[in-house]
Image (cartoon, grey):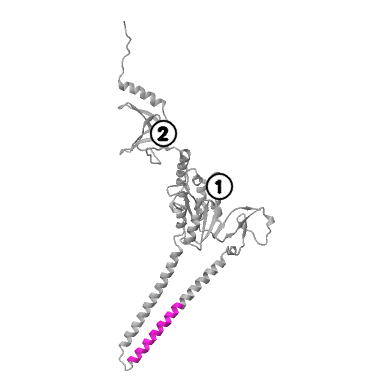
Amino acid sequence: MQYNINPAISVSALTNRIRSVLESDFVGIDVQGEISNFKHHSSGHRYFTLKDDKAQIKCVMWRGKYLSFQPRDGMQVIAKGSLTVYPPQGNYQLDCSDLRPLGEGDLYLAYEALKAKLMTEGYFDANRKKALPKLPFSIGISTSPTGAAVQDMVSTLKRRLPFTTVYFRPTLVQGEGSAEDIVRAIKDLEKTPAEIIIIGRGGGSIEDLWSYNTEMVAKAIFDCSKPIISAVGHETDFTIADFVADLRSPTPTAAAELSSPITIDDLDNFLEDSELRLIRNIGLRVSQYKTSVIDRFARLATRRVSDTLNQYHQFVDTSEIQMSSRIKSENVKLNQSIRRLESHLKSLHPLSPFNKGFAALMHDGKYIDKNQTLQDYDEIEIIRKIEKTNVKIIKENRI
């Protein structure tokens, strides 16, 4: 009886044949799974296991491959790579060329691509960012009228700078058409007397915040002639708007605080300190003159030194009383001048008639003259003042 026995091959030869098949057939594939046993080696290479509920595969990402996030165990990702075989252990593994978090997917890639594009075009340059006024008398806000953000910002500004006027432009902050409305809101607020514009909203997912990651919003911020504070999401949320804006705030409430670095309390303290310094300096000067007079007449050797000194003592005391009275009188005049100036400034404000219930009519960015008739316009804007909140509402009204 004869046996036909095939010649045996070595382990390395078999491994090389398997390697040849795997590495030629599985190139540039996307694999979805959960990261496990992630290790960033001191050499710079990254080793981890990608698994699901039924199987797992070892993965490697060599040093020099860019990652825009920090992988961690339990994270769902999509890995792009090719199968390779590691002959010493007879294991196959996925050689990763790219890794991205699952769930962010296309949005995350679009975010990174737009961020890189705008950075190249100079949208994020520090030398083009505008400085914020330290004591603004008017501030514009663009956010949702139904969220807590607008209430937090308005209440913070009323507490810190009660004399500041807030121009509130209700804005659609997410969903279809929201990016376009944010752009319109920035342009509307740019036309108001607002010295600073705050754009923002509360936190949310990357999808919720996506309108602030669009190029049209970035361009509107970049082109705005007034400084803009971006207050989108929570402290850990970063949007394209944050990078383009003149200042990024971690929260909407913090944006209100950043826009009012000098508060009404700071102004009160400054006036009190100034008054104290003025009184102290005048008192010191009076004391110096008094000492000088006493020293001068102490050196006189006349028969009526005592009478002369008494006269000068009386003169000094009278002068001190007169100067103190004059100081009080000057302080009263100064306070009256400040009140008259404040009243005069308020009366000169072009929007002061709003306090008496008047409204302004605008069409196409221009005010409608009192001699014109409304029959000439299909669409007008009505600007009024809300007494309780000191907030002016900017919106479209069709008649």
Q: Tell me if mark 1 has few (under 14), some (14-19) or many (20+) residues whose alpha carbon lies within 10 angstroms of its own.
A: some
In the image, what residue type sits under mark 2? Gly
Residue beneath label 2, please?
33
Is 254 drawn above or below residue 86 in the view shown?
Answer: below
Q: Is residue 122 left or right of residue 348?
A: left
- In the image, 253 versus 363, the foreground residue is 253
Residue ID for mark 1? 180
CA neighbours of label 2 inside 10 A, class few (<14), some (14 to 19), many (20+): many
Above-or-below relation of 128 to 292:
above
Tag shown at residue 324: none
Q: CA distance from mark 1 to mark 2?
A: 37 Å
The image shows residue 389 at horizontal and vertical percentages of 54, 59
Magenta residue check for 252: no
Q: Amino acid at mark 1?
A: Glu
Ranked by sequence position, the earlier of labels 1 and 2 is 2
Q: Are marks 1 and 2 in contact (CB under 8 Å)?
A: no
For residue 154, say whether it is visible: yes
Towards the viewer: 310 or 225: 310
Label 2 sits on a secondary structure element that is strand
Residue 62 located left or right of residue 145? left
Q: Quadrant of residue 383?
A: bottom right
Q: Residue furthest top?
A: 1
The stretch of residues the image draws in magenta is 305-328
| Spot occupied by residue 219 in the image (x, y as percentages of width and height) | 51, 48
Q: Quadrant of the N terminus?
A: top left
Q: Is residue 178 left or right of residue 5?
A: right
Residue 313 falls inside the magenta stretch:
yes
Secondary structure category for the residue under label 1:
helix
Magenta residues, dominant SS class = helix
Q: Measuring from the top left, give residue 191's x and y in whole percent.
A: 56, 56
The spot of residue 181 in percent (x, y) is 55, 48
Residue drawn 38% across and 26% down? 23
